[in-house]
Image: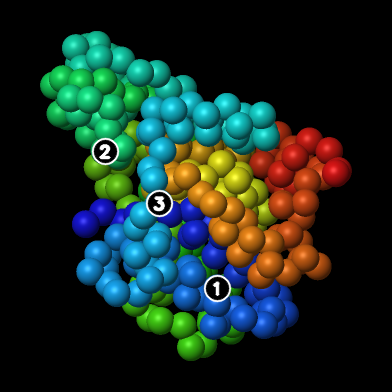
């Protein structure tokens, strides 16, 4: 089964980063948030579970992937987060697109899940993305260029001190999801060869506890689309992150935002990505904030 890119992963990342410096958590984290987060992560992996919370998570209604993709892109761009060019076309149109397009196949009719499959386009409507030149995915960079910068290492570093008793199954799913790999895409990034100084900018941008990445997590949470991970985020040589793949998401009832704002440390730098304020400069370095102005 494919790894579900639930927005709860983004919530977990923000909360973990906000509490990493002090190692202190609000009362109820272990008894409440861990259970809620675990249900979100495991609901697709344990379909026969009798846990009422897991069952309730499975009842969430998926959004239409085409509508969500274009809605998410519009919001992200207004927040100053780059996205890629997208368009909807027929299978016939998709088959004759130039090689700088990636095709996501929806099937005979608009489906609730789109699967990246550039080699198999027959019928139905497709969502297609144009490649962004001179960029690479965080996954490619972590495997080919900055091999010490693993997602698992980061995740354990940020959360190990405050999650000593957490479910190791969930821990493995977190690391696997945030570090999602797509080796067939490597061919698109073969010419990405940053200099040593550019490598340092990229390292800063791709850190899971860094403000550029957390800002993208916050935006995805508010939209309700799938969490950012190493397979669906690109980075430029200047250290600017680019968000991909926003077609998966659910209609939420607001419990996701309640969990986020209750357990995030409001004195932390990570909280500032939720509070609005300053934006990022053109090089992708943090000037802190999700919005355009201070509320």
- The part of the image, by quadrant, that contains residue 269 is bottom right
Q: Are marks 1 and 2 in contact (CB under 8 Å)?
A: no
Work out whether mark 1 precedes mark 2 in sequence or the reverse, and give the earlier one.
1
Label pair 2/3, CB-CB below 8 angstroms: no
Residue 82, located in which quarter of the rendered image?
Answer: top right
Q: In the picture, which quadrant includes the N terminus?
A: bottom left
The local secondary structure at tag 1 comes to helix
Q: Name the residue carrying label 3.
A: 60
The image shows residue 48 at horizontal and vertical percentages of 23, 69
Q: Residues within 10 Å of mark 3 (few under 14, many from 20)?
A: few
Q: Position of residue 75 (x, y in %)?
A: 61, 32
Residue in view at x 34 percent, y 58 percent: 58
Q: Which mark is residue 206?
A: none
**Label 2, label 3: how far apart the Cα atoms are:** 20 Å
Residue where numbered disc 1 is placed: 33
Question: Which sits earlier in the primary sequence, circle 2 or circle 3?
Answer: 3
Tag 2's secondary structure? strand
As drawn, is 256 to the left or to the right of 290?
left
Q: Nearer the viewer, mark 3 or mark 1?
A: 3
Provide residue 283's location: percent of width, then percent of height.
68, 38
Instruction: Tell me: 86 left or right of 28.
Output: left
Residue 115, label in figure? 2
Residues at circles 3 and 1 in contact by the CB criterion of under 8 Å:
no
């Amino acid at each position: 089964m494919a790894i579900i890119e639930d927005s709860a992963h983004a919530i977990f990342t923000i909360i973990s980063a906000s509490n990493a410096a002090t190692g202190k958590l609000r009362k109820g984290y272990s008894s409440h948030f861990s259970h809620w987060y675990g249900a979100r992560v495991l609901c697709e992996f344990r379909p026969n579970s009798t846990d009422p919370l897991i069952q309730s998570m499975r009842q969430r209604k998926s959004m239409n992937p085409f509508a969500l993709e274009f809605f998410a892109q519009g919001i992200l761009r207004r927040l100053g987060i780059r996205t890629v060019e997208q368009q909807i076309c027929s299978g016939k149109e998709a088959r004759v697109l130039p090689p700088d397009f990636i095709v996501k196949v929806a099937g005979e009719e608009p489906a609730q899940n789109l699967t990246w499959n550039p080699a198999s386009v027959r019928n139905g409507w497709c969502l297609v993305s144009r490649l962004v030149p001179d960029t690479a995915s965080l996954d490619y960079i972590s495997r080919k260029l900055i091999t010490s910068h693993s997602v698992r290492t980061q995740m354990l570093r940020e959360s190990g001190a405050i999650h000593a008793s957490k479910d190791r199954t969930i821990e493995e799913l977190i690391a696997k999801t945030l570090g999602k790999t797509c080796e067939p895409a490597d061919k698109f990034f073969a010419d990405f060869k940053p200099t040593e100084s550019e490598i340092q900018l990229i390292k800063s941008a791709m850190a899971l506890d860094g403000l550029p990445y957390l800002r993208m997590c916050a935006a995805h949470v508010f939209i309700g689309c799938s969490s950012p991970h190493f397979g669906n985020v690109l980075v430029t040589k200047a250290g600017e992150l680019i968000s991909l793949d926003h077609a998966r998401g659910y209609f939420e009832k607001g419990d996701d935002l309640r969990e986020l704002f209750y357990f995030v440390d409001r004195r932390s730098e990570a909280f500032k990505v939720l509070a609005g304020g300053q934006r990022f400069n053109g090089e992708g370095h943090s000037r802190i904030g999700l919005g355009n102005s201070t509320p």
